[in-house]
Image: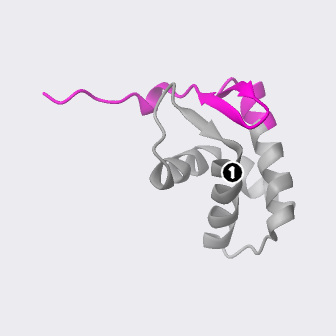
């Protein structure tokens, strides 16, 4: 099984994992390195070894897939806006 399949088969879990590591909110910026380091740590937590450069390739696959699903909207070559309404910031009452 491809290592990237672990992320694609657990996409919601991966997105929530990224939120636990980075300040992600609906319509916030997310950068390539956030995804890259998120991939490395997520796979490491699943006991799947991934080298730095291999994780970069997986991060690119993830970003492309999320763009196709409109979860990420490209701003430039290294950044996106997260379109994930579930992560809308709640106002304090």
Closer to the camera in the image, 61 or 47: 61
Q: Quadrant of the N terminus?
A: bottom right
Residue depicted at 46% across the width and 34% down the height: 25
Residue depicted at 68% across the width and 76% down the height: 47
78 w.r.t. 5: above or below: above
Q: Is residue 10 visible?
A: no
Q: Secondary structure at mark 1?
A: helix
Q: Is residue 11 left or right of residue 92?
A: right
Closer to the camera in the image, 58 or 36: 36
Residue depicted at 79% across the width and 60% down the height: 55
Q: Which residue is mark 1?
A: 33
50 w.r.t. 8: above or below: below
Q: How did the renderer colour the structure?
A: one colour
32 w.r.t. 93: above or below: below
Q: Residue 3 sits in which quadrant?
A: bottom right
Residue range of the region highlighted in magenta in the rendering = 64-93
Q: Residue furthest left?
A: 93
Q: Is residue 19 left or right of residue 69?
A: left
> How many marks on residues?
1
Percent of width and height locating residue 74? 72, 25
Residue depicted at 82% across the width and 45% down the height: 60
Closer to the camera in the image, 12 or 77: 77
Say few, some or many: other residues with alpha carbon within 10 Å of mark 1 (under 14 / 14 to 19 / 20 or more). few
Q: Would you say residue 82 sits in the magenta stretch?
A: yes
Q: Residue 90 sits in which quadrant?
A: top left
Q: Quadrant of the C terminus?
A: top left
Q: Is residue 43 left or right of residue 19?
A: right
Q: Would you say residue 83 sits in the magenta stretch?
A: yes
């Amino acid at each position: 099984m491809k290592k990237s399949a672990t992320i694609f088969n657990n996409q919601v879990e991966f997105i929530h994992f990224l939120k636990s590591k980075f300040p992600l909110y609906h319509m916030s910026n997310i950068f390539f390195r956030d995804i890259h380091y998120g991939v490395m740590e997520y796979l490491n937590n699943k006991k799947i070894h991934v080298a730095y450069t291999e994780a970069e390739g997986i991060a690119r696959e993830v970003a492309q897939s999320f763009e196709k699903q409109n979860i990420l909207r490209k701003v430039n070559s290294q950044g996106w806006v997260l379109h994930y309404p579930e992560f809308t910031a709640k106002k304090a009452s």
